[in-house]
Image (spheres, rainbow, N blue to C red):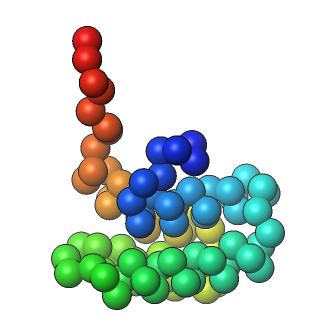
Protein backbone atom coordinates (compact mmCIF):
# COMPACT_ATOMS: atom_id res chain seq x y z
CA UNK A 1 0.00 0.00 0.00
CA UNK A 2 1.28 3.46 -0.85
CA UNK A 3 0.77 6.52 1.37
CA UNK A 4 -1.81 8.11 -0.94
CA UNK A 5 -3.87 4.92 -0.97
CA UNK A 6 -4.40 4.96 2.81
CA UNK A 7 -7.60 6.96 3.15
CA UNK A 8 -9.69 5.06 5.74
CA UNK A 9 -8.89 4.38 9.39
CA UNK A 10 -8.13 0.73 8.63
CA UNK A 11 -5.88 1.61 5.68
CA UNK A 12 -3.93 4.22 7.64
CA UNK A 13 -3.36 1.77 10.48
CA UNK A 14 -2.40 -0.96 8.01
CA UNK A 15 0.09 1.38 6.33
CA UNK A 16 1.84 2.22 9.62
CA UNK A 17 2.08 -1.50 10.46
CA UNK A 18 3.44 -2.14 6.97
CA UNK A 19 6.16 0.47 7.50
CA UNK A 20 7.10 -1.18 10.79
CA UNK A 21 7.26 -4.64 9.18
CA UNK A 22 9.53 -3.22 6.48
CA UNK A 23 11.81 -1.67 9.10
CA UNK A 24 11.02 1.84 7.91
CA UNK A 25 9.43 3.05 11.17
CA UNK A 26 10.68 3.48 14.72
CA UNK A 27 9.31 0.48 16.63
CA UNK A 28 8.28 2.32 19.80
CA UNK A 29 6.80 5.19 17.79
CA UNK A 30 4.89 2.78 15.57
CA UNK A 31 3.46 0.93 18.57
CA UNK A 32 2.37 4.17 20.20
CA UNK A 33 0.78 5.52 17.02
CA UNK A 34 -0.92 2.22 16.22
CA UNK A 35 -2.39 1.86 19.71
CA UNK A 36 -3.72 5.42 19.55
CA UNK A 37 -5.21 5.12 16.05
CA UNK A 38 -6.67 1.66 16.60
CA UNK A 39 -8.27 2.76 19.88
CA UNK A 40 -9.85 5.76 18.15
CA UNK A 41 -11.08 3.68 15.21
CA UNK A 42 -12.55 1.04 17.51
CA UNK A 43 -14.32 3.71 19.56
CA UNK A 44 -15.89 5.18 16.39
CA UNK A 45 -16.94 1.81 15.00
CA UNK A 46 -20.55 0.65 15.15
CA UNK A 47 -20.17 -2.61 13.22
CA UNK A 48 -19.27 -5.84 15.04
CA UNK A 49 -16.92 -7.01 12.26
CA UNK A 50 -14.94 -3.76 12.56
CA UNK A 51 -14.85 -3.86 16.35
CA UNK A 52 -13.59 -7.44 16.30
CA UNK A 53 -10.90 -6.61 13.73
CA UNK A 54 -9.77 -3.57 15.71
CA UNK A 55 -9.70 -5.58 18.96
CA UNK A 56 -7.37 -8.12 17.37
CA UNK A 57 -5.25 -5.39 15.83
CA UNK A 58 -5.00 -3.55 19.15
CA UNK A 59 -3.80 -6.63 21.02
CA UNK A 60 -1.23 -7.30 18.30
CA UNK A 61 -0.05 -3.68 18.26
CA UNK A 62 0.45 -3.63 22.03
CA UNK A 63 2.63 -6.75 21.66
CA UNK A 64 4.60 -5.22 18.78
CA UNK A 65 3.34 -7.86 16.34
CA UNK A 66 2.96 -5.64 13.28
CA UNK A 67 2.28 -8.37 10.75
CA UNK A 68 -0.57 -9.57 12.98
CA UNK A 69 -1.98 -6.03 12.97
CA UNK A 70 -2.02 -6.16 9.17
CA UNK A 71 -3.70 -9.60 9.17
CA UNK A 72 -6.37 -8.45 11.64
CA UNK A 73 -7.27 -5.48 9.46
CA UNK A 74 -7.22 -7.33 6.14
CA UNK A 75 -10.98 -8.16 6.22
CA UNK A 76 -11.83 -4.48 6.59
CA UNK A 77 -9.63 -3.46 3.69
CA UNK A 78 -10.94 -6.30 1.52
CA UNK A 79 -14.53 -5.22 2.14
CA UNK A 80 -13.79 -1.78 0.75
CA UNK A 81 -12.58 -3.20 -2.56
CA UNK A 82 -10.39 -1.47 -5.09
CA UNK A 83 -10.98 2.20 -5.84
CA UNK A 84 -13.14 2.97 -8.86
CA UNK A 85 -11.31 4.29 -11.88
CA UNK A 86 -12.51 7.46 -13.49
CA UNK A 87 -12.75 6.43 -17.11
CA UNK A 88 -11.86 3.87 -19.68
The vertical placement of 8 against 32, above or below, is: above
- Judged from this view, the residue extending furthest toward the front is 86
Q: Residue at x 29, y 26 (%)?
A: 85
Task: Identify which residue is drawn at 25% across, 17% down.
Answer: 87
Considering only vertical position in the picture, is 3 above or below 55? above
Q: How many marks?
A: 0
The one of 85 and 61 positioned closer to us in this rendering: 85
Residue, far top: 88
> Is 72 rendered above or below residue 34?
above
Quarter of the view holding residue 47? bottom left
Residue 2 appears left or right of 49: right
Can the viewer see residue 23 in this picture? Answer: yes
Q: Residue at (48%, 52%) from the top-left corner?
A: 6
Locate residue 6 relative to residue 3 in the image: left or right.
left
Identified at 51% across, 66% down, the residue is 13
**Image quadrant of residue 86?**
top left
Q: Does residue 5 sit above or below 86 in this rendering?
A: below
Instruction: Provide residue 57's location: percent of width, then percent of height.
Output: 47, 76
Is residue 60 among what the camera can see? Answer: no
Q: Position of residue 21 (x, y in %)?
A: 69, 58
Placement of the C terminus among the 4 image quadrants: top left
- Residue 26, quarter of the rendered image: bottom right
38 with respect to 19 (left or right): left
The N terminus, quarter of image: top right
Determine whether, in the image, residue 2 is placed left or right of residue 51: right
Q: Give x and y (percent) for residue 54.
A: 39, 77
**x and y percent of residue 45 in the render?**
27, 79
Residue lying farthest to the left in this orientation: 47
Amino acid sequence: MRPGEATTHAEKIYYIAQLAVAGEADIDGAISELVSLISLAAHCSTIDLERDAYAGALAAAKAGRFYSVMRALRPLISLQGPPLSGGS
